[in-house]
Image (tube, rainbow, N blue to C red):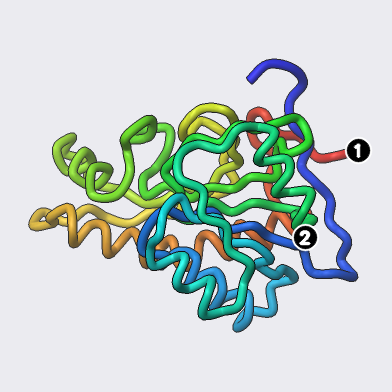
């Protein structure tokens, strides 16, 4: 992405931030965010779920009475801007959403993603789910983890908010490593959200505090 580096957004502490959650599959990241927002008193509400297909994430939205949009395929920039405007969203959290999003200037530093590896390694197009963990094992790594980052207009290259690490064990399979990393994700995503909402997100390459 060209132009000036994105500023980290500021949020009104007197009102919960309005989140959109975008998902493509099982919905466990969405489910975890809903639970943690409630249990940890995170100053946010999920006001929209966008699913790229009919999936369990869509069922979770229906059960929670959250407005749901099912949009197969990639969103265009005008479509994304319309959703944000119509639902008055402050932030978008990608929760296993597999399509590349356009990032218009108004949404720079307002789209979050969590990746099940230590970026910049093992990211990029097609690197999701068990493919990531299989690649970590094939590379002989002794450590893995997850990364929460701001999104730009490429896969997995935006500024990092935080990383969490875990060991890779000698007898690991992609499935056992995925389970261990997801336990990190359950805490990392809510923690990164709180950091961003409260202005505690650390300065990262490509991001600077708003004036």
Residue at x 49% of width, y 35% of height: 100
For the residue carrying disc 2, how many other residues have a C-alpha within 10 Å: few (<14), some (14-19), or many (20+)?
some
Residue 45, given in percent of the width and then of the height, sits at 70, 70
Q: Nearer the viewer, residue 39 or 54?
A: 54
Query: Looking at the picture, how far across and down is residue 29, in whole percent?
Result: 45, 64
Q: Is residue 157 above or below residue 113?
A: above
Look at the numbered disc 2 and give the secondary structure of its residue. loop
Residue at left offset 50%, top offset 66%:
30
Residue 173 in the figure: left or right of residue 93: left
Q: Which mark is residue 193?
A: none
Judging by the rendered image, the residue that carries numbered circle 2 is 198
The quarter of the rendered structure image containing the N terminus is top right
- In the image, taking residue 132 as reference, residue 211 lies left or right, namely right
Q: Residues within 10 Å of mark 1 (few under 14, many from 20)?
A: few
Real-space Cα separation, disc 1 to disc 2, in angstroms: 15 Å
Q: Mark 1 or mark 2: which comes first in sequence? A: 2
Cβ atoms under marks 1 and 2 closer than 8 Å:
no
- Residue designated by label 1: 211
Tell me: residue 154, above or below residue 46.
Answer: above
For residue 101, above or below residue 59: above
Q: How many marks?
A: 2
Q: Nearer the viewer, residue 197 or 99?
A: 99
Q: Write down the quadrant of residue 41 in the picture.
A: bottom right
Q: Label 1's element? A: loop
Q: Which residue in the rendered view is the most extreme toward the left?
A: 171
Identify the residue shown where x is 39% and y is 42%: 118
Q: Residue furthest bottom?
A: 39
Left or right placement of residue 56 versus residue 20 in this view? left
Q: x, y (%) of residue 85?
A: 79, 48
Instruction: Kindly identify the residue that appears in the image at 18 percent across and 59 percent down.
Output: 175
């Amino acid at each position: 992405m060209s132009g000036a580096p994105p500023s980290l957004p500021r949020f009104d502490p007197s009102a919960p931030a309005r989140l959109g959650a975008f998902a493509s599959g099982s919905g466990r990241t969405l489910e975890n965010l809903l639970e943690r927002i409630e249990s940890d008193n995170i100053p946010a509400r999920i006001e929209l779920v966008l699913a790229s297909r009919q999936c369990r994430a869509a069922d979770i939205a229906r059960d929670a009475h959250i407005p749901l949009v099912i949009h197969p395929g990639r969103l265009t920039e005008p479509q994304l801007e319309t959703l944000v405007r119509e639902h008055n969203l402050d932030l978008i959290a990608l929760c296993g959403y597999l399509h590349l999003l356009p990032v218009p200037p108004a949404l720079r530093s307002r789209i979050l993603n969590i990746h099940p590896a230590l970026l910049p390694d093992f990211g990029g197009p097609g690197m999701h789910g068990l493919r990531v963990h299989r690649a970590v094992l094939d590379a002989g790594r002794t450590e893995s983890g997850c990364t929460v980052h701001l999104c730009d207009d490429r896969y997995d290259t935006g500024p990092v908010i935080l990383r969490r690490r875990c060991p890779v064990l000698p007898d690991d399979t992609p499935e056992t490593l995925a389970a261990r990393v997801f336990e990190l994700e359950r805490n990392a995503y809510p923690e990164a959200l709180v950091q961003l909402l409260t202005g505690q997100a650390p300065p990262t390459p490509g991001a600077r505090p708003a004036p």
